Amino acid sequence: MGERVEVMLTEEQVDRRIQEMGEQISRDYEGRQVHLLCVLKGGSFFMCELAKRITVPVSIDFMSVSSYGSDTKSSGVVKIVKDLDESIKDKDVLVVEDIVDSGRTLSYLLEMLQDRHPASLHLCTLLDKPDRRVVDVKVDYTGFRIPDEFVVGYGLDYDQRYRNLPFIGVVKFD
Ligand code: IMP
Ligand code: MG
């Protein structure tokens, strides 16, 4: 069975949108330092591109979570595989995610981070699939709202592949 990837959002579209998001975040965090928290692995490509376009002081940290569930569905039970290196207490934290789907992972994660008393806590995602939402999550910055399709590229994988695509695509099977 053949597999191919159809382009949903071109590299130019994604880059242009990330530039706009960087400008917006720079305005909103004027006079402050923003502490970007990247959720590995998917968020890493987006976070690097976004960080380069933010003009206020930036610091970064990474965490890795895994949800117990099948490969394309998350269960809502989230395990921290790698925790943050630094405390987020009193920091202006911006969580950077690749995609919000059911919202289960983020909802759990945001609650856990809130318990660590950051000065502020906001969420930025490159993609949002609102049709799939099961748990309510407040998204502060959204790159693109997309239809309910399984997408790859720009950090997002299908069976660990395609993360390196510089655009957002949909896997098609012939
Ligand atoms: P949620 O907990 O259902 O919101 O799912 C969150 C995680 O599922 C994301 O951070 C992705 O890692 C993964 N995911 C959800 N939808 C897609 C997709 O369309 N392509 C690739 N990964 C996805
Ligand atoms: Mg992810």
Image (cartoon, rainbow, N blue to C red):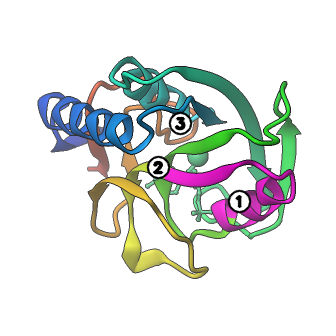
Looking at the image, is mark 3 or mark 1 nearer the viewer? 1
**Disc 3 marks which amino acid?**
Gly
Residue 109 falls within the magenta-colored stretch: yes
Residue type pointed to by label 1: Leu
Residue 122: numbered disc: none
For numbered disc 3, what is the local secondary structure? helix
Q: Tell me: is circle 3 under 8 Å from ligand 2.
A: yes
Residue tagged 1: 110
Q: How many marks?
A: 3
Q: Which residue is mark 2?
A: 124
Q: Considering the numbered disc 1 on the image, is that residue within a helix, a strand or a loop?
A: helix
Which residue, given by chain and number where applicable, does mark 3 sit on?
43
Q: Are marks 2 and 1 in contact (CB under 8 Å)?
A: no
- Determine whether, in the image, residue 171 is placed left or right of residue 58: left
Q: Which secondary structure, mark 2?
A: strand
User: First in sequence: mark 2 or mark 3?
Assistant: 3
How packed mark 2 is, by other alpha carbons closer than 10 Å (few <14, some 14-19, many 20 or more), is many
Q: Which portion, as a residue range, is magenta?
A: 105-123
Q: Residue at x 29, y 50 (%)?
A: 172
Q: Residue at x 86, y 59 (%)?
A: 115
**Camera-side residue of 170 and 2:** 170
Q: Can I make out residue 2 in this image? A: no
In front: 14, or 92? 92
Q: Where's residue 122, x and y in %?
A: 56, 54
Q: Nearer the viewer, residue 91 or 3?
A: 91
Mark 1, other Cα within 10 Å: few <14 / some 14–19 / many ≥20: some
Q: Earlier in the sequence, mark 3 or mark 1?
A: 3
User: Where is 96 relative to 86, above or below?
Assistant: below
